[in-house]
Image (cartoon, rainbow, N blue to C red):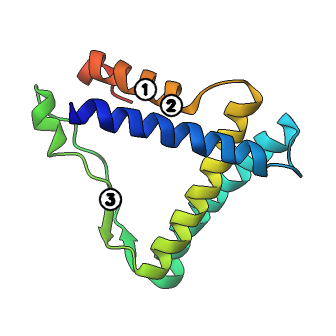
Amino acid sequence: MDNIIANKNSKEFCDKFQEQVSELLIRHKSIIDIMTKLDEYTSRINRAVAKSVTTCGCISIHAEKQNFDGEYFEELQGKVSSHLEGKLCPNCKDIIEAEIGNSMFYLTSLCNSLNLKLYDILQKEYERNETLGIYSLK
């Protein structure tokens, strides 16, 4: 029962967010503007993460070849790494969250322009992952 309520609240939240975005988007209403703004904010997210490493130093990246040796999926989960060390400081976390939020705004704007429901997209992706399990690895 709680899962049904949570899903209902999630759908309502997504629908309200989508409606809010629709009401607030004025200057960049063109599909071309939306696509380029979405691309811009993806770059801004990448830049904010890079600045967390190079300017702040709260996180660091120690990249090396991933170890995919193993027969079973469970074995691989413990062997692959994000290459990240450390933890985002509050300032870097705020900046990255704001950039991701802006990106979500334009992603939702794209959904609105194409008459797509954000919740439906999220649910379909969740169900695909749930159904395919490890065969949906990306």
Secondary structure under badge 2? helix
Residue at image position (33%, 24%) is 129
Q: CA distance from mark 1 to mark 2?
A: 6 Å
Foreground mark, 2 or 3?
A: 2
Q: Which residue is mark 3?
A: 83
Q: Amino acid at mark 1?
A: Gln
Please provide percent x and percent y for residue 11.
Answer: 46, 34
Q: Which of marks 1 and 3 precedes in the sequence?
A: 3
Q: Is 43 drawn above or below residue 61 in the view shown?
A: above
Q: In the rendered view of the protein, which quadrant contains the N terminus?
A: top left
Q: Which of marks 3 and 2 precedes in the sequence?
A: 3
Quick check: 23 left or right of 27?
Answer: left
Q: Which residue is mark 2?
A: 119
Please provide percent x and percent y for residue 85.
Answer: 30, 69
Q: CA distance from mark 2 to mark 3?
A: 31 Å
Q: Residues within 10 Å of mark 3 (few under 14, many from 20)?
A: few
Residue at image position (64%, 56%) is 102
Q: Nearer the viewer, residue 111 or 59?
A: 111
Q: Amino acid at mark 2?
A: Tyr
- Contact (CB < 8 A) between labels 3 and 1? no
Quick check: 70 left or right of 15?
Answer: left
- Contact (CB < 8 A) between labels 1 and 2? yes
Q: Residues within 10 Å of mark 1 (few under 14, many from 20)?
A: some
Secondary structure under badge 3? loop
Residue at image position (77%, 40%) is 35
Q: Residues within 10 Å of mark 2 (few under 14, many from 20)?
A: some
Please provide percent x and percent y for residue 74.
Answer: 11, 33
Q: In the rendered view of the protein, which quadrant contains the C terminus?
A: top left
Q: Amino acid at mark 3?
A: His
Secondary structure under badge 1? helix
Q: Which residue is mark 1?
A: 123
Quick check: 17 left or right of 73?
Answer: right
